Amino acid sequence: MLCANANAQTSAALKSVGTITVGITPAGLAITPDSRFAYVANNNNYGIAGGDTVSVLNVRNNTFVQTISDASFNEPYTVTINATGTKAYVTNSNAETITIIDIPSNTVSGIIAGFDGPSGMVITPDGTRAYVNNYGGPGGVGSGNGTTVRVVDLATNSIIGAPITVSLAPAALAISPDGKFVYSINYVDGNPGTGTISVIETSTNTVVATIPGFSGPFAIAITPNGRFAYVTNFGSNNFAPFGTTVSVVNLRNNTVTATINVGIQPSGIAITPDGKYAYLTNYNTLYAGPGFTDLTAGEGTVNIIDIATNTVIPPTLAVGESPSAIAITPNGKNAT
């Protein structure tokens, strides 16, 4: 896990300030509202015994704090932290559950059941509800075959209402700053142009629009003013074809207004609190041999997009292999 200073976005002063060892195949991460700690979901897609864990990091001094282990973890994939910084919600992508971590004690305090390969979660601004996407898991329809989003009552930690039907393979979610809309990016089959965004109106929990034209969408971030969404086009899960672009969506009329060329397999994306820059990771892992053999990780990179101009600006930051996610501290000082 690499930490970088995010203050000087356009200068040579932007650089890595530390590398922290975490668990096996880290995936999603989230930072507490006070910008002190990061929680990292170690996906452990190699199936190593005891490897399904969450790492806790101190992002003020870039040190490892502890590992949280629990029997409920099953290929943990994303972490979502509530606005008060008291709870972290971990999606278990190989199961039907979300694990709740009590942040003050760093212990597991509960489980929410009833999902199908959950791989993303967002919380409404008032903290009362959450939306969770069902990508599909082995106990349900199978990986990549999910088509629903579920609503959770966070007071009772239970699913409420009927499933919200979206397009195939909902991969990630974002919520508008005012909480009126949830945006589900749908991977579909990873081929060019087949991916979509389903726009869910939270007052009715219905899909009110579908935005087409994405290529294996992997992550989505919304500007603080709620006007634009930035979507990474990863490409195929088989890494052929692979993506090299970020799509910019105007959320006032739900249309793609720009396409930005970035690195190979753009994956995670985050926007600075001032709304000036988007940081994105390029996974850069491809098959070196014929017939989808010899999967080889190249050097991962981070690109910076100037949101005012929708252009990539220097520097390009070299990071470790296969970086899949990125988060920026709420105070805007660091990216992890």
Image (spheres, rainbow, N blue to C red):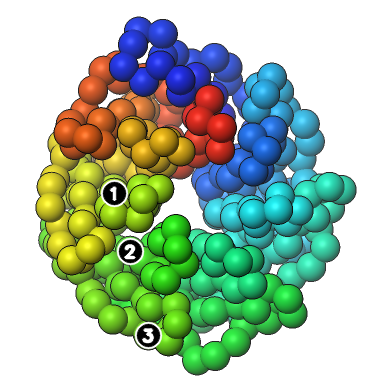
In the foreground, 56 or 304: 304
- The picture places residue 244, in percent across and down from the top left corner, at 19, 40
- The picture places residue 180, in percent across and down from the top left corner, at 42, 71
Residue 206 bears which disc, if any? Answer: 3
Badge 1 local density, few (<14 within 10 Å), some, or many (20+)?
many
Label pair 1/2, CB-CB below 8 angstroms? no
Mark 1 against mark 2, which lies toward the viewer? Answer: 1
Residue 185 bears which disc, if any? Answer: 2
| Secondary-structure class at tag 3 | strand
Q: Is residue 112 above or below residue 189?
A: below
Q: Can residue 270 be seen here?
A: yes
Question: In the image as oriented, which residue stretches furthest toward the top?
Answer: 12
Label pair 3/1, CB-CB below 8 angstroms? no
Residue 274 located left or right of residue 89: left
Q: Can residue 295 be seen here?
A: no
Residue shown at 57% from the left, 70% from the top:
130
For the residues labelled 1 and 2, the Cα–Cα distance comes to 11 Å
Badge 2 local density, few (<14 within 10 Å), some, or many (20+)?
many
Q: Is residue 32 above or below residue 137?
A: above
Q: Is residue 31 above or below residue 139?
A: above
Name the residue beneath numbered marker 1.
230
Q: Amino acid at mark 2?
A: Ile
Residue shown at 61% from the left, 41% from the top:
31
Residue 278 located left or right of residue 2: left
| Secondary-structure class at tag 1 | strand
Q: Earlier in the sequence, mark 1 or mark 2?
A: 2
Residue shown at 44% from the left, 13% from the top:
15
Q: Amino acid at mark 3?
A: Thr
- The picture places residue 202, in percent across and down from the top left corner, at 44, 78
Instruction: Find residue 200 and report its image quarter.
Output: bottom left
